Image: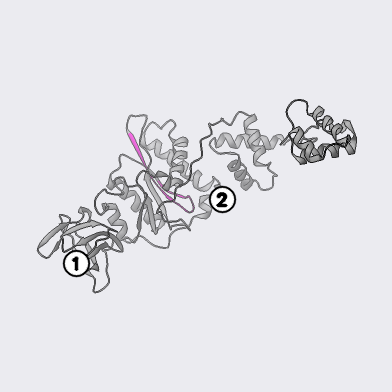
Amino acid sequence: MAWRKTDVEAERKSLVQDWLKGRYTVVQLARMYGVSERVAHKALRRFREGGYPALQDRSRARHTQVCTASEIVNALVESRRSHPHWGPRKLRSHLATERPEVEWPAVSTVGSILVRHGLVVERRRRRARAGHSGPCVDATAPNVSWSMDFKGQFRLGDGSLCYPFTVTDNASRYILRCTALDGTSLQGAWRELRRCFRENGLPSSIRSDNGSPFGASSLTGLSTMKVRLLKLGITPDLIQPGRPQQNGRHERMHRTLKAETASPPAAAKNAQQRRFNAFMDEFNNQRPHEALGDRTPASVHERSVREMPSQIPNAEYDEGVTTRSVRTNGCFKWGSVEFFLAAPLAGERVAFDPLDEDIYMIRFTTVPIAVFDAAEGKLHPAGTTIKG
């Protein structure tokens, strides 16, 4: 509790006068004047030290004001104009790395300087939302988990549509790929992903949404891309439908990408790609990242030790495991009956691990994709429990 905002000095003086009468304790006086005991004791201490004059309000302003040198202010302003989307912390960290001999001001002071020079636009504060923890692979080190996605398409100056395909490393935030494509086809995405594997090696997993060409809304959830990734020993790490926050790091990069390269878009695809290339260079090599201890992604990222093979290998299974070949129509044969499994598995072999009598878990490489009830002749989604 604090003093009522009327005449604070008069309130303090009245409290002291009542205390001098000896009729009330400090606890009683605090209740009478609607303040805490600490505030009441503070008023009495002031009186004992300096009498009634000491009860006046004291200025909270700093008695000394240290002005930031003009050359430092100019450097901050120039850096902000060169990087209009960087905040005070990023700017200060970047300049401190470039010119460590300079004693740069605190982040709060940098922010005040930017405001003073009209370089900060007040943004509406959004209500905080609780985070969501999904079944995604944790990025504990570079190349443990990558993310890939198509940034929402936008129209270029010549009227054509641009579909940016992006790949990032989730631990280092390093942008591995950002390519302007003409659509979201499997062919274009896989071509870029294959180039990314050759340049950077293979990750352990890749996170994406369930849209085409990454996922499929079939019983097995297998797409052609997922089948290829599994054969390379890469775990497809699909987020839950309608939960883009599970790929939040990648989505945040996309917002920055749009703001810095497509607002407004370039006149044509080649010009837009040059913007993407410049953005990648700055993001990876110049922009400090708070989650990385204000280091750049390039200083944290490292190439994977797993190399991209010249040809995608076939799925391999331990000796003695029951397997079946999937035909060109996506079916496997059990006895004399065909069962449709998944079209992307055409030409592949799948394993049948017994769970119970006449009940099998079907898996492709190491990943369960369905449960097969041979007695009933039915297929169920992976993870389904069937009572015998």
Identify which residue is drawn at 63% across, 29% down.
117
The residue to which callout 2 is attached is 295
Nearer to the camera, 209 or 337: 337
For this view, does 200 lie left or right of residue 74? left
Nearer to the camera, 282 or 348: 348
Tell me if mark 1 has few (under 14), some (14-19) or many (20+) residues whose alpha carbon lies within 10 angstroms of its own. Answer: few
Nearer to the camera, 252 or 137: 137
Identify which residue is drawn at 54% across, 31% down.
123
> Residue 36: which disc?
none
Query: Over which residues does the magenta segment extend?
Result: 161-177
Can residue 252 be seen?
Answer: yes
Tell me if mark 2 has few (under 14), some (14-19) or many (20+) residues whose alpha carbon lies within 10 angstroms of its own. Answer: many
Q: Name the residue at the bottom extreme.
A: 320
Q: Amino acid type of disc 1? A: Asp
Q: Amino acid type of disc 2? A: Arg
The answer to which quarter of the image holds residue 154 is: top left
For this view, does 4 lie left or right of residue 386? right
The answer to which quarter of the image holds residue 266 is: top left
Kind of element beneath mark 1: loop
Nearer to the camera, 29 or 65: 29
Q: How many marks?
A: 2
Identify which residue is drawn at 34% across, 46% down.
241
Q: Position of residue 210 (x, y in %)?
A: 32, 47
